Image (spheres, rainbow, N blue to C red):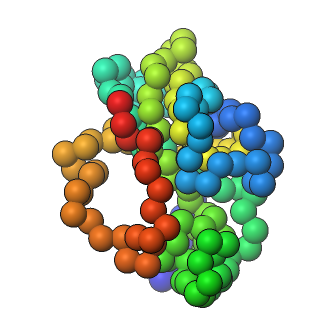
Amino acid sequence: MTQPGFMLTPIGSISTPWRTVADCPRNGRQPDPAPVCRVHILPAFVPGLLGLEGMSHLILLYWLDQAKSSQLVFTPPFDPEPRGVFATRGPRRPNPIGMSVVRFDGLDGPDQLLVRFLDCVDGTPLLDIKPYLPTTDAEPDAAMGWLAPHATRNTNTEP
């Protein structure tokens, strides 16, 4: 199904220390302390930041503008079996939308957020910001399927 005139509007851009896809950490895994990254919000969207103060984590959605063309089945670098893209977090998706749960270190002026644990290239277009709600977004008994043996400790959501 297609939507005539369907389009996304970036609300800002993301500044990170990583200049290429190869430089980016996998799934936000980084040494502690993770580097501070800046999220620049376009002026028209700054009023939407009202109320972020006091939140410790956010969900950022962004457009992986440097991702290669979509690949529906591939073999992940850490697993010998071919997997469907929808069973992975790989960037080569039909719609290359990235998502990260980031630690929110506060605002720097009216239009910049300071965050940690991002995994995208410098200059990545920002699509949306949502509050991370541990009572809604974390499910302690969630199953990871084939990814369970490959799980790493998640420091992104620890205070």
- Do we see residue 87 in this rendering? yes
Q: Tell me what residue is drawn at x 22 percent, y 50 percent.
A: 136
Q: Tell me what residue is drawn at x 72 percent, y 62 percent.
A: 67
Q: Is residue 158 left or right of residue 30?
A: left
Quarter of image, res 53: top left
Q: Is residue 125 left or right of residue 68?
A: left
Q: Residue furthest top?
A: 109
Q: Quadrant of the C terminus?
A: top left
Given residues 104 and 46, the one toward you in this image is: 104
Given residues 16 and 27, the one toward you in this image is: 27
Where residue 19 appears, x then y in whole percent? 80, 42
- Do we see residue 9 in this rendering? no
Q: Tell me what residue is drawn at x 71 percent, y 56 percent.
A: 65
Q: Is residue 24 left or right of residue 119?
A: right
Where residue 157 appears, x then y in whole percent? 38, 41
Given residues 72 and 9, the one toward you in this image is: 72
- State how many labels appear: 0
Where residue 61 appears, x then y in whole percent? 50, 49
Where residue 20 appears, x then y in whole percent? 80, 49
Quarter of image, res 144: bottom left
124 up-or-down from 44: above or below: below
136 up-or-down from 52: above or below: below
Given residues 62 and 77, the one toward you in this image is: 77
Q: Is residue 146 left or right of residue 40?
A: left
35 up-or-down from 30: above or below: above
Q: Tell me what residue is drawn at x 44 percent, y 41 percent.
A: 156
